Amino acid sequence: MSDLHAALSALKRPRLLVGAARKGLLFYRRDRDLKAALRGSAPGPVADRLLETEARLEEIRQAGTAGYSVSDHIAVLTALIAEAATARRAA
């Protein structure tokens, strides 16, 4: 899971977006929120699915597409941060 930590560290996102995701950790419950964050993603390992979903949301954000959801992006980033923290504690 160090790959997840490295991938997360390599992300360059707006401070406001990352700050909101970090604050979301206070309210994050894996059993409830992970399913919502992974909605519509392809099957596979959770970390990979979250990274793919986040990359797709980032592309949409940068393109300025009307379908972009800030709250979905924050939810996925929050789940990514939480999964990386869980992996770090398990290692």
Image (tube, helix red, strand yellow):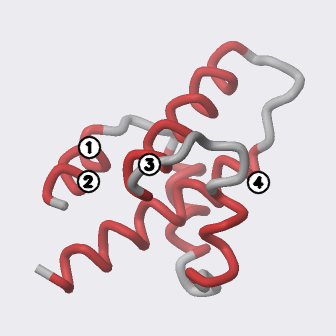
Residue to which mark 4 is pinned: 71
Residue kind at label 1, given as amino acid type: Ala
Q: Are marks 4 and 2 in contact (CB under 8 Å)?
A: no
In the rendered image, the vertical position of residue 3 relative to residue 64, given as above or below: below
In the rendered image, the vertical position of residue 81 relative to residue 57, given as above or below: below
Residue at x 76%, y 54% (from the top left corner): 71
Quarter of the image where one finds residue 63: top right
Quarter of the image where one finds residue 81: bottom left
Residue to which mark 3 is pinned: 44
Residue to which mark 1 is pinned: 7
Residue kind at label 3, given as amino acid type: Gly
Quarter of the image containing the C terminus?
bottom left
Q: Residues within 10 Å of mark 4 (few under 14, many from 20)?
A: few
How many angstroms separate mark 4 from mark 3 (CA)?
23 Å
Quarter of the image containing the N terminus?
bottom left
Residue at the front extreme, as displayed: 43
73 left or right of 30?
right
Q: Earlier in the sequence, mark 4 or mark 2?
A: 2
How many angstroms separate mark 2 from mark 1 (CA)?
5 Å
Residue at x 88%, y 23% (from the top left corner): 66
How many angstroms separate mark 2 from mark 3 (CA)?
14 Å
Question: Which sits in the foreground, 52 or 66?
Answer: 52
**SS for callout 4:** helix
**SS for callout 3:** loop
Residue kind at label 2, given as amino acid type: Leu
